[in-house]
Image (spheres, helix red, strand yellow):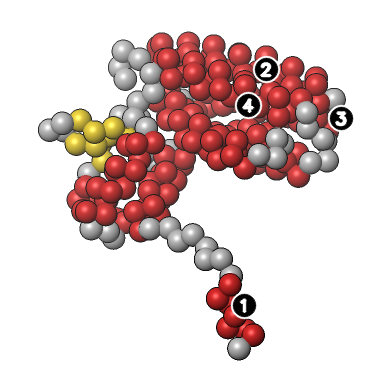
Amino acid sequence: MGGSSATASRPAEPVQTLAETVAGRIREKVISGTLTPGGHLSEMTLCEELQVSRNTLREVFRILTKEGLLRYEANRGVFVSTPSMSTIIDIYRVRRFIECPALAQAHPRHPGTQRMRAAVEDARRCREVKDWLGVGSADIAFHAAIVELADSPRLSSFYAHISLELRLVFGLLQDPEFLHGPFIDQNGDILLELEAGRSTAAAEKLEAYLLRAERFILGAYARVAPSA
């Protein structure tokens, strides 16, 4: 009797719908670089691969189109979104607003610092085997860990969406070694400042880093934009 009452009073955990679960799998394809900007999504292929009906897949497309990850073109179908130059500028503006204050106010023993360290080491391991897409994933994990320093689940959730858009930007440039190589050791330098208790200096390095990265990516984007 007492056990039944405890079970009945326990709040129900939110349950993902099938469409939300499948949407998560497509997001993972973007994160891994399997789906790249401008790529066409075949309903038939995805239905077979994901083992879902066309109605479910169309609901997935609606979810991801609303998020800006996909776009629909009349009489042509659904495509992975292609970031514009203004999108890139806005992403980096938002990143500076979020990441720099989170780092400036961080405690060096925060659990997020350990995740930053793990991401730096992962990036270096990937560099050794020339897994440049892996380096890109580690870089995104490093900056997500910086946001975790703010102890705000809402900020972390918002940043997860920014990270998806950032991965689209990375995918558009199509040269992950050129893109990620210069920033591996810079991430390490920022981490060393934080681990030494110099969070303000770490934040200043991060702001300069993000400004350099923005200019670097805009320059690379300008070179590929005509073909994109």
Whichever of callouts 3 and 1 sits on the residue coming sooner in the sequence is: 1
Identify the mark nearer the N-term, 1 or 4: 1
Does dot 4 land on a helix, a strand or a loop? helix
Q: Quadrant of residue 68?
A: top left
Disc ID at residue 6: 1
- Picture quadrant of residue 152: top right
Are the residues flagged by discs 3 and 2 in contact, CB closer than 8 Å?
no
Mark 2–mark 1 distance (CA, rounded to whole Å): 50 Å
Q: Position of residue 224 (x, y in %)?
A: 37, 16
Q: Which residue is mark 3?
A: 197
Residue at 79% x, 41% y: name it: 110
x, y (%) of residue 126? 60, 39
Residue 6 spot, x, y in % from top left: 62, 77
Measuring 67% from the left and 17% from the top, which residue is drawn there?
207
Per the image, label 2 sits on a secondary structure element best described as helix
Residue 123 vs residue 164, the one in the foreground: 164
